[in-house]
Image (cartoon, rainbow, N blue to C red):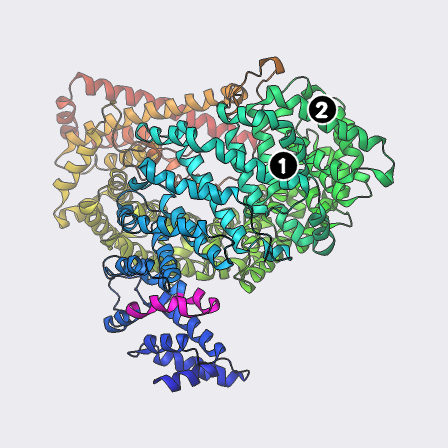
């Protein structure tokens, strides 16, 4: 498509007529891979005579095409852009950065970023020369800095060898960059364009020093030259002339951006490279130099900047936040704190506290957009930019590390505000200061709860100064009272009526006319539910609570809301049964709403997506709580099926783990697995074969449930053929040469599930699966995978020993496999521990497999017999040790947390006279979400470390068909069978055993007798219980 026709098509993309627009888009897609297409798009983008709307469409299409097609994700995929077109784009695009307006520059900048990340330095070696050359050109300096920023950003998060190209970039450009920086800083009354250039230089410097300081900057003279310029920018006032009036635009104004980036850089240097405690020995010289020459000077500048808060002048939120971060990091450093100490009262009471108080912006947002007020209040990202959060962090660190000299006066200051508020008449009460004081009390919660004399006064403080605000006429005080009450819900109330009254006020707050009060009340309720010792306080109002909760969920998308519901469900367990269906229906509705919200606005924050995850997690918690009531699962299934069907496809990648957990519960606890639930099997298999290999461990759990709990359907159904489907997936994964060992581990576990649950019904699959396991065994590197693959053979032997042994003979691998197996059984670590088959389950599987061979005419009977004896003895010891540990753990749990201290809470000054002692475990309780089905089978993800014990750890609730098989009894029965069927062979075997093995055999026989008695006793107890 030539240039004029391309311009016509691009214009048609903007058409209001859907047919014309669609035809134009199809035409673009049809011709996008033709030679010169990218080049022509670039020509239109930079053509000043062309309509701006057309140029913008061209720039967007150019950016999207480059992002998708410049460099294929798959190395084997063919190149979609010709080398000649790439070369022409690289040769021309850099110069256009300066020529195009900012709207188009953003699109071109993204394209340059994509190309640099793909091509530099290998395919674009001339790029750095272009940058250095144009840094010296007055007309191209902006373009050169812009490209240098993109170039250095490529290496911002790289470390070690990947960072080497950055050092070359710094070496080639920083001398010139420093010279340009110096000249720009010296310009008197600089125009706003100078701010844009300085900002780019700051960003280049930031990316270059983010992880490591380049060696060029270790030269004290060079580093000092840079620091002089940064401190100059920090000290100089931001020009008044030209500042926008609108605060949203003002904070993004060029000179305020320069101030922000300057402080950002100085903070990074201070916290990462200027802290002596964090530095390796070779970097301590730099840290000492920074502390001595610059840290104090920067602190002085910061304190002067913060004066704007006292005088009511403008200071952007992000700048305030960054400065307070610097001050907070200075608290623990003696020399820096000594500098702050003379001004600490001013900092604390005239800067920090005013930032903690409710302000005009809060009021405006509360009234005009309460949903946004709630979102900002609970958004972690907002916290990164919030002066209020930074002020709270400063107070927390100050009382934690310098509490001796500051806690008492700060508490007195707060108490004074409480007193003045209490005494003032309604029309002159300091409502906003009271809000700040309540925030401060909540912030100091952890410190006050463990410090004398305050911890004894907390209940009185709540009753006198917090709880009365539940009925305040001022909305933000009602909200803050709910939040503070939630912070202190776990203290020991001497009068339970105070706890009860507060909790009922919190519940009432869920019906407050103001949305933020309702939200804060729900969050506070979580703490009260956790702390409630007598659930009868909540039981009567549970239906009302749940009703109010779901009304709020319909208004606000917030995953934290769901935490409260999970806490209620977790606390009441089976008592939630009458509400389970309704809860799941409400959560399903909320889930679909959150998903629709998230999909409708991809550019928005991800609160909708997070809330959707929260809904699914809450559904799992409900299913767990009613797990002993299988009939409920039948009622709940129709509500959850649409979610499972949709989210088990690629549409559900962001929530796949949560959905699989729901499928696991539904397939494990339902009375039977319905045909509707079976319809999910193909979806999981399709995902596993396509994109979901990272979730294989999670998919394993429901697949196990299908085979173990729905064996009949699995074996008899031919449309779809589940046995063939399982083989197709497992063979594809295990035969893939590029698949990591750790990714394959669930596959042999599934083969085990097949052999153990389908005994006598899958003979035709024995040979294929043995071939598969042995083939992979030849290539396996990780010991844990080798163990699992050998266990496939052990499971096959237990499934059908004669068929399996015949198959191994047919494959010609009998000697090889048994030599490997016995070698692995004998292998020990330096500690003397077994190197392989370390789980109880693994030993048991090996015992059953080897024992199954005793009655067969195997050549290596003596070796098999001895190995089985050794293994049974080890298994017996491990089972006994596990039982002992479980008993001991139960005894020890009461005092477990009492010994835990928090080293980070140590003060720089001594706090002994303040009665600092450890928390009494108030914060110990955490939400317990059991991954039931995964735990029930011991199929936890393996650690990457080959020597990790995690791979070999047993799960307490391991369940499989072999649970009912006692390996000791089976061994004795097989030996008796051998004695009866082939006495001479038995006698020969006994004669070959030395004293040690005879003793082992006798011990195993005695233990088997003991186990028979124990099993009979358990059966009798179970029968009597029924």
Q: Give SS at disc 1.
A: helix
Would you name the residue on which mark 2 appears?
412
Residue 659 placement (x, y as % from top left): 49, 52
Q: Main secondary structure of the magenta part?
A: helix
* Crowd around label 1: few <14 · some 14–19 · many ≥20 (10 Å): some
- 216 with respect to 317 (left or right): left
Residue 462 placement (x, y as % from top left): 75, 29
Magenta highlight on residue 104: yes
- 581 with respect to 435 (left or right): left
Q: Is residue 795 visible?
A: yes
**Looking at the figure, which quarter contains the C terminus?**
top right
Q: Is residue 747 visible?
A: no
From this view, report whether residue 643 is shown above or below residue 805.
Answer: below
Residue found 30% across the figure and 31% down from its top:
838
- 227 with respect to 90 (left or right): right
374 or 206: nearer the eye?
A: 206
Residue found 30% across the figure and 64% down from its top:
71
Would you name the residue on which mark 1 appears?
571
**Looking at the figure, which quarter contains the N terminus?**
bottom left
Residue 881 placement (x, y as % from top left): 37, 22
Range of the magenta residues? 90-108
Magenta highlight on residue 610: no
Closer to the N terminus: mark 1 or mark 2? 2
998 or 632: nearer the eye?
A: 632
Q: CA distance from mark 1 to mark 2?
A: 38 Å
């Amino acid at each position: 498509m030539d240039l004029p026709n391309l311009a016509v098509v691009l214009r048609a993309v903007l058409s209001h007529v859907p047919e014309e627009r669609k035809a134009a888009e199809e035409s673009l897609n049809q011709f996008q891979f033709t030679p010169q297409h990218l080049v022509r798009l670039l020509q239109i983008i930079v053509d000043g005579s062309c309509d701006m709307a057309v140029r913008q469409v061209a720039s967007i299409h150019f950016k999207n095409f480059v992002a998708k097609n410049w460099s294929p994700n798959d190395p084997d995929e063919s190149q979609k852009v010709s080398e000649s077109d790439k070369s022409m784009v690289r040769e021309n695009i850099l110069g256009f950065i300066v020529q195009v307006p900012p709207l188009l520059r953003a699109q071109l900048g993204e394209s340059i970023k994509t190309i640099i990340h793909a091509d530099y330095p290998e395919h674009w070696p001339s790029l750095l020369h272009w940058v250095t050359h144009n840094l010296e050109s007055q007309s191209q300096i902006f373009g050169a800095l812009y490209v240098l920023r993109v170039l250095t950003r490529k290496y911002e998060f790289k470390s070690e060898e990947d960072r080497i190209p950055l050092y070359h970039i710094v070496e080639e450009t920083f001398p010139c960059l420093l010279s340009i920086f110096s000249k720009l800083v010296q310009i008197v009354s600089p125009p706003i364009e100078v701010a844009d250039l300085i900002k780019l230089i700051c960003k280049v410097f930031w990316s270059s020093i983010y992880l490591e300081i380049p060696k060029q900057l270790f030269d004290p003279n060079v580093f000092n030259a840079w620091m002089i310029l940064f401190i100059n920018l920090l000290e100089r006032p931001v020009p008044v002339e030209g500042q926008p009036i609108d605060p949203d635009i003002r904070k993004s104004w060029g000179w305020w951006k320069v101030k922000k980036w300057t402080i950002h850089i100085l903070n990074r240097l201070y916290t990462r490279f200027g802290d002596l405690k964090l530095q390796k020995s070779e970097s301590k010289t730099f840290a000492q130099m920074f502390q001595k020459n610059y840290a104090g000077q920067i602190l002085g500048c910061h304190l002067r900047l913060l004066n704007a808060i006292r005088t009511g002048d403008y200071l952007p939120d992000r700048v305030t936040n960054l400065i307070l971060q610097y001050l907070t990091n200075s608290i623990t450093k003696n020399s820096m704190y000594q500098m702050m100490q003379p001004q600490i009262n001013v900092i604390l009471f005239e800067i920090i506290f005013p930032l903690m108080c409710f302000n005009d912006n809060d009021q405006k947002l509360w009234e005009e957009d309460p949903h946004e007020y709630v979102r900002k209040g609970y958004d972690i990202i907002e916290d990164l930019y919030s002066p209020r959060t930074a002020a709270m962090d400063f107070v927390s660190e100050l009382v934690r590390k310098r509490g001796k000299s500051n806690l008492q006066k700060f508490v007195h200051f707060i108490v004074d505000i409480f007193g003045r508020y209490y005494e003032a008449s309604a029309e002159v009460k300091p409502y906003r200061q009271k809000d700040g004081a309540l925030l401060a009390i909540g912030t100091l919660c952890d410190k006050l709860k463990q410090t004398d004399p305050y911890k004894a006064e907390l209940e009185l403080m709540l009753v006198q100064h917090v709880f009365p605000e539940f009925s305040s006429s001022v909305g933000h005080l009602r909200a803050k009272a709910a939040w503070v009450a939630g912070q202190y819900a776990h203290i020991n109330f001497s009068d339970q009526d105070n706890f009860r009254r507060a909790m009922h006020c919190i519940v009432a707050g869920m019906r407050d006319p103001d949305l933020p009060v309702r939200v804060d009340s729900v969050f506070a309720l979580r703490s009260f539910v956790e702390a409630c010792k007598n659930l009868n306080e909540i039981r009567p109002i549970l239906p009302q609570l749940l009703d109010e909760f779901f009304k709020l969920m319909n208004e606000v998308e917030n995953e934290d809301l769901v935490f409260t519901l999970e806490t209620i469900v977790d606390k009441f367990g089976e008592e939630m049964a009458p509400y389970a269906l309704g809860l799941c229906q409400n959560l399903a509705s909320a889930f679909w709403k959150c998903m629709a919200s998230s999909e409708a606005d991809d550019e928005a924050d991800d609160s909708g997506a997070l809330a959707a995850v929260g809904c699914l997690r809450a559904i799992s918690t409900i299913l767990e709580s009613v797990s002993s009531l299988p009939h409920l699962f039948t009622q709940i299934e129709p509500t959850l099926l649409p979610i499972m069907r949709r989210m088990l496809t690629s549409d559900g990648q962001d929530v796949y783990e949560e959905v699989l957990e729901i499928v696991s519960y539904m397939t494990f606890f339902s009375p039977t697995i319905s045909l509707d639930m079976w319809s999910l099997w193909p979806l999981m298999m399709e995902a596993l074969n396509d994109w979901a290999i990272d979730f294989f461990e999670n998919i394993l759990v429901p697949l196990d449930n299908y085979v173990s709990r729905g064996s009949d359907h699995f074996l008899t159904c031919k449309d779809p053929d589940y046995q063939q489907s399982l083989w197709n997936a497992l063979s594809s994964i295990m035969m893939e040469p590029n698949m990591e060992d750790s990714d394959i581990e669930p596959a042999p576990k599934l083969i085990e599930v097949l052999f153990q649950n389908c005994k006598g019904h899958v003979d035709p699959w024995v040979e294929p699966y043995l071939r598969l396991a042995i083939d992979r065994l030849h290539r396996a590197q990780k010991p844990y995978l080798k163990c699992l693959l050998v266990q496939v053979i052990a499971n096959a032997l237990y499934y059908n020993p004669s068929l399996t042994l015949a198959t191994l003979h047919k494959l010609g691998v009998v000697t090889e496999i048994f030599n490997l197996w016995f070698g692995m059984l004998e292998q020990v670590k330096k500690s003397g521990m077994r190197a392989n088959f370390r789980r109880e389950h693994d030993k048991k599987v090996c015992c059953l497999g080897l024992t199954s061979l005793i009655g067969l005419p195997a050549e290596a009977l003596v070796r098999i017999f001895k190995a089985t004896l050794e293994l049974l003895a080890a298994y017996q010891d491990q089972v006994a040790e596990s039982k002992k540990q479980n008993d001991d753990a139960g005894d020890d749990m009461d005092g477990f947390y009492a010994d835990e201290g928090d080293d980070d809470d140590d003060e720089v000054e001594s706090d002994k006279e303040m009665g600092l002692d450890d928390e009494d475990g108030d914060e110990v309780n955490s939400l317990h979400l059991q991954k039931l089905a995964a735990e029930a089978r011991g199929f936890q993800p393996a650690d990457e470390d080959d020597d990790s014990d995690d791979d070999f750890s047993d799960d307490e609730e391991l369940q499989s068909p072999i649970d009912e098989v006692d390996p000791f009894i089976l061994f004795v029965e097989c030996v008796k069978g051998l004695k009866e069927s082939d006495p001479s062979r038995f006698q020969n075997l006994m004669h070959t055993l030395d004293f040690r093995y005879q003793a082992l055999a006798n011990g195993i026989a005695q233990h088997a007798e003991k186990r028979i008695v124990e099993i009979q006793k358990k059966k009798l107890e179970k029968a009597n219980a029924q």
